[in-house]
Amino acid sequence: MQELWSPICDQLGIQYPIFGFAHDVSTVAAITNAGGYGVYGATRRFPQEIKEELATIRKLVGDKPFGVDLVLPPGMPEHNSRAAIEAEIPQGHKDFVNHLIEKYRVPEATVPGMRTRFIRSAEIEREQIQAVLESSVDMFACGIGAPADVMRQAKEQGKTTLALIGSPHHVPRAVAAGVEMLVAQGYDAGAHTGPIGTYSLVPQIVDAAGDIPVLVAGGVATGRHIAAALAMGAVGVWMGTAWLLSEEHQGHMHPVNTAKLKAAGSADTVITRSESGKTFRQIRSGWSQEWEADGAPSPLKMPYQDVLVGDLLGAIEEHDIEPLIHSGAGQSIGYFNEVKPVHEIMERLVAEATDVLRRQPSYLR
């Protein structure tokens, strides 16, 4: 019986060419165990947490492959010093955040926010990288940046190296860094995304990449999208939004976010820099609208925006401030409106893609 396959399946030892990104340990393990390739987003985790969480995933998946993703942007401060960053934040930005706190009556957070647990810095990055290199993880993926020395060390330990890119101009730099796989991430994608639409982007990156395998991200939600990705010359797909409404991910999700994701259509997402200082696609909410309003300051660069809003973002979810609660999500969220286990989501994707590829008529005569 025919089933969905591409050469990357044999190369990496997976059943389906579907790579699933999530910030939740259980979800990542479920993606791998369902035949895909789970990738854990560990950028906001302390090095010791990365070590422990990767070990937990390994126990859950046995010898099946899985990966980890870090964001390693250039130009970050050297030290993990919150005080040094706060000293450089303009008072007008602090006043705006205080205005939001007062307007929405947000109580103070009891713990630092996800973005202020530590400062995005070279110091922390080195420790995170070391935790990954010392783990048994099979893939080292870079959501932003791909330092050549890190890619070299990962390959020396037998780990596949991968980078997400949003422009054909990024291909030579990634290739020079020694990256072995590329993710062409289109404008449709959730979280950190670029300005070029997926259909325009993918063929250009496939052509520029040569023999380097390319995955497609951004707007991938159905088997038809997977078939289209393969038709454009990619070897598989990279999906994140698809798993947000999985049963496994609900332990990581605020109930208000679950409700907003169920109700959202593709037009209900916006790109904002108010989350981290980098472009970030998320569900439209009071948060994004406040930062788009007349008189709102322009978001700061990373990590200054992280420090400016990090504790407030944590307090918003901790104290259930419904209008401001939001989640990163791609435009593909319009295809997902109910909670299902990962294996059912995977089975539907595979069945749809297999059916499309089997039934595809010829348009040649």
Image (tube, rainbow, N blue to C red):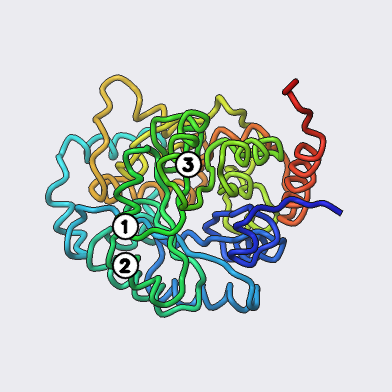
Residue density around tag 1, few if under 14, some if 14–19, many if 20 or more, within 10 Å? many
- Left or right, residue 205 beside residue 60: left
Q: Which residue is mark 2?
A: 150
Task: Looking at the image, tell me whether mark 3 or mark 2 is earlier in sequence order.
Answer: 2
Please say whether residue 106 is visible from this viewpoint. no
Q: Position of residue 265 (x, y in %)?
A: 62, 28
Q: Nearer the viewer, mark 3 or mark 2?
A: 3
Please say whether residue 203 is visible from this viewpoint. yes
Residue density around tag 3, few if under 14, some if 14–19, many if 20 or more, within 10 Å? many
Residue 44 lies in what quarter of the image? Answer: bottom left
Q: Which residue is mark 3?
A: 206
Amino acid on which disc 1 is placed = Leu
Amino acid on which disc 3 is placed = Val
- Left or right, residue 212 beside residue 79: right
Circle 2 — which element?
A: helix
Q: Nearer the viewer, residue 149 or 364?
A: 364
Task: Looking at the image, tell me whether mark 1 or mark 2 is earlier in sequence order.
Answer: 1
Q: Which residue is mark 1?
A: 72
